[in-house]
Each structure stands twice: as structure tokens, then as C-alpha cells.
């Protein structure tokens, strides 16, 4: 089970965007990568089509999950979540620092 999901807030630990925070847009668990908003921008040269004029476009590229860390929504600190089971058997993520459940 991954500890990072869509719409989580994360902070980048290493690389050219070190220290920047963003929201997870997409997760690729089989590749071990995620796409974070406004992080790891790359330029792509696109050919013109009937719908699009083409040109140089900037977009977010995938980044390794190991290079980011989850941010607790309550205490706003980077953390490695703790996993726990509720009484109904559902698995949840908890903040190790403040004990808050992470949705």
C-alpha cells in the first residue's frame, strides 16, 4: 500500500525543486512515480495538428515517490504516516506527530 494518494499535499526532498510544496495530481504505483502540481516542469515540443497550433509546451513530468514526503493537513509538517485499522476493519493513515487521521 502506498502512503501517498491523489490530492495529498507533499514536499519535495531532493532535486531541482527541493523544498517546494504541491498537490499530487496523479499516482503511478507500478512505476513508483507521481505527478505533483507545479513541480518538475519540462518542455515538450509538440507538432501542429488540426486542433492545435503546436509549439513548445511546459508540463509537469513524473517524479519518484521516494523524492517526496507527505504533509499533515493539521500540523503542516512532513511525515511518514502510521497505518492503523479502525474497528470496522478499514485501514487508515495517521500522523505520527499530532495523531490526526489523513483522509
Image (tube, rainbow, N blue to C red):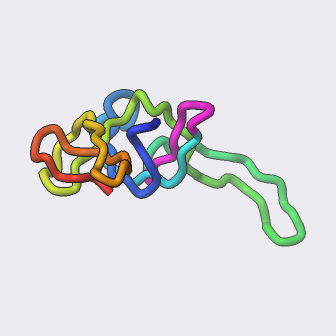
Position of residue 64 measured from the top left corner of the image (x, y, whole percent): 49, 31
Q: Quadrant of residue 11?
A: top left
Which residue is painted at 34% across and 54% down in the image? 88
Which residue is painted at 35% across and 28% down in the image? 14
Position of residue 87 measured from the top left corner of the image (x, y, whole percent): 28, 51
Position of residue 29 measured from the top left corner of the image (x, y, whole percent): 56, 37
- Left or right position of 13 against 27: left
- Left or right position of 76 against 14: left
In the displayed structure, 42 sits above or below 25; it is: above
Position of residue 23 measured from the top left corner of the image (x, y, whole percent): 39, 54
Which residue is painted at 45% across and 37% down in the image? 2
Q: Can you say which quadrant of the picture contains the C terminus? A: bottom left
Q: Is residue 20 visible?
A: no
Of 94 and 89, the residue lying toward us: 89
Of 74 and 23, the residue lying toward us: 74
Q: Is residue 31 visible?
A: yes
Which residue extends farthest bottom? 51
Q: In the image, which residues are magenta? A: 29-38
Which residue is painted at 26% across and 34% down in the image? 80
Q: Quadrant of residue 57?
A: bottom right
Amino acid at each position: 500500500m502506498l502512503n501517498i494518494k491523489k490530492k495529498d499535499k507533499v514536499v519535495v526532498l531532493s532535486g531541482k525543486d527541493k523544498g517546494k510544496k504541491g498537490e499530487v495530481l496523479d499516482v503511478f504505483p507500478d512505476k513508483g512515480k507521481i505527478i505533483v502540481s507545479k513541480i518538475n516542469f519540462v518542455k515538450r515540443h509538440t507538432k501542429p495538428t488540426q486542433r492545435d497550433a503546436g509549439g513548445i509546451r511546459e508540463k509537469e513530468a513524473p517524479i519518484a515517490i521516494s523524492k517526496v514526503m507527505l504533509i499533515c493537513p493539521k500540523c503542516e509538517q512532513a511525515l511518514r504516516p502510521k497505518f492503523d485499522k479502525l474497528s470496522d476493519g478499514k485501514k487508515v493513515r495517521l500522523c505520527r506527530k499530532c495523531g490526526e487521521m489523513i483522509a
